[in-house]
Image (tube, grey):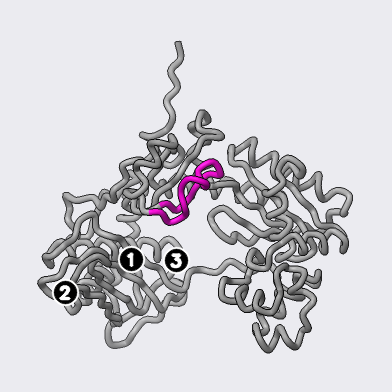
Amino acid sequence: MYGILDCNSFYASCERVFKPHLIAKPIVVLSNNDGCVIARSIEAKSFVPMGAEAFKYEKVFKEKHINVFSSNYSLYGDLSTRVMSILSKFTLDIEIYSIDEAFFKLDGISKDELEDYVSKIKYTIEKQVGIPVSIGVAKTKSLSKVANKIAKKYTNETKGVYVILNNEQRIKALKWTKVEDVWGIGRSISKKLKFQNIHTAYDFTLLSDELVRNKFSVVGLRLKQDLSGNSTIGIEVVRDKISIATTRSFEYVLRDFEPIKERIATFANACAEKLRRQHSECNYLYVFLKTSSYSSVKRNVGVVVHLPYITNSSITICNYANRGIKQLFKKGYNYKKAGVVVMGLKPEEEHQFSLFEDENPRHKSLMKVIDKLNLKYNKPTVKIANQDLDKTWKMKQDHLSPRYTTAIDEIIEIKCN
């Protein structure tokens, strides 16, 4: 049997863990630079659409008493790790699907014990972390997603846990599920299916294998079989990222080369740090530069920069990223966004040395010291020289809550009388 654990209104729930007075109150969370709405609590969904530009809805926020938060990824990431850590104590086979979702297998547990077992998982997470979760269980991964939707939709009846045990429950659940809500069926495919009078997940399973394979590929056929109760989509093994990106919109438009160069160096350094954390190295970079979408004169350009040797050194990656931005920059434009993507990743232990040119071996030791110091002080204490030593990259975060669990100077203070 497969299960999927889904944290309810995850970003909003993270804020409520430390502000319980906001339980059942409307909450929205904004994207980087407080640009647009990326998460909403159930109470806020009827007032604010997903992706709404924050400045256009300031009046709505006030009128409807909606609590607004800047995205606090440090807090969200830590609470997600705590949730997944607890889940791993109940099952060995886990696939972390996103920051707030995870598939897992439940082998060796009888059908009679399944609901009590997953209810215990739910209770433990909510008790120890404070994040409400919903859990769906079924014979296949896609059916567990359907079960999870039912658990969320009918919370009072299911108590946040729903298990599809037999064929009768499977058919009833699939007839209830709209075809556009099926995991793996996108907007374009659902339109094609509706054109053929396929409106529910159950309708989809009644199509012939040949038709599904011809019109929707082998992937569509696997999904159909999975929904029919034949497991074809297993737990995926977690792999390291194949590329790492650091991209940002500038708080203000930039027209001069030097501040853009400094931003690129900072982004490149962030990519290098991420590489070292997953013990990888990169072969080449992609650097891009964009004007604002509202600019009358647009310029969106990018360049691939090949490295002379594979590396995860901040010094090397920053230097070559700046070579890339020199090729891209032209005066006279209002630049609003830039980024660095490191690609061609390989494990650090597979590093192959070149006979003709290779990196200074002292870089490795230096990077270890820098990472250790920055981790110790929980901020970029040591920077690369082509970064602005007096500047800390700061997004617009006017509604940022404290990093209660990851910054020692932001933990909750308790006053005892």
- Amino acid type indicated by mark 1: Lys
- On the image, which quarter does residue 355 sit in? bottom left
Task: Categorize mark 3 by other alpha carbons within 10 Å: few (<14), some (14-19), many (20+).
Answer: some
Residue matched to label 1: 364
Task: Categorize mark 1 by other alpha carbons within 10 Å: few (<14), some (14-19), many (20+).
Answer: some
At horizontal 40% and vertical 40% (from top left) the residue drawn is 61
Q: Residue 329: which numbered mark, if any? A: 2
Q: Quadrant of the N terminus?
A: bottom right
Question: Is residue 255 depicted above or below 304 in this figure?
Answer: above
> Going by the image, does 251 lie left or right of 106?
left
Question: Is residue 408 depicted above or below 81 in this figure?
Answer: above
Q: Are marks 1 and 2 in contact (CB under 8 Å)?
A: no
Residue 122 image position (x, y, % from top left): 69, 43
Q: Does the magenta stretch include residue 42?
A: yes
Range of magenta residues: 37-52
Report the Cα–Cα distance between label 3 and label 1.
12 Å
Residue matched to label 3: 279
Which callout, 2 or 3, points at the residue further toward the start of the chain? Answer: 3
Depth check: give the residue in front, 249 or 275.
Answer: 249
Number of the front mark, 2 or 3: 2
Q: Residue 170: which numbered mark, if any? A: none
Q: Are marks 2 and 3 in contact (CB under 8 Å)?
A: no
- Amino acid type indicated by mark 3: His
> Going by the image, does 160 lie left or right of 360?
right
Secondary element under disc 3, as helix, strand or loop, is loop
> Going by the image, does 118 lie left or right of 85?
right
- Amino acid type indicated by mark 2: Phe
At horizontal 45% and vertical 22% (from top left) the residue drawn is 414
Depth check: give the residue in front, 283 or 136.
Answer: 136
Report the Cα–Cα distance between label 1 and label 2.
31 Å
Can the viewer see residue 264? no
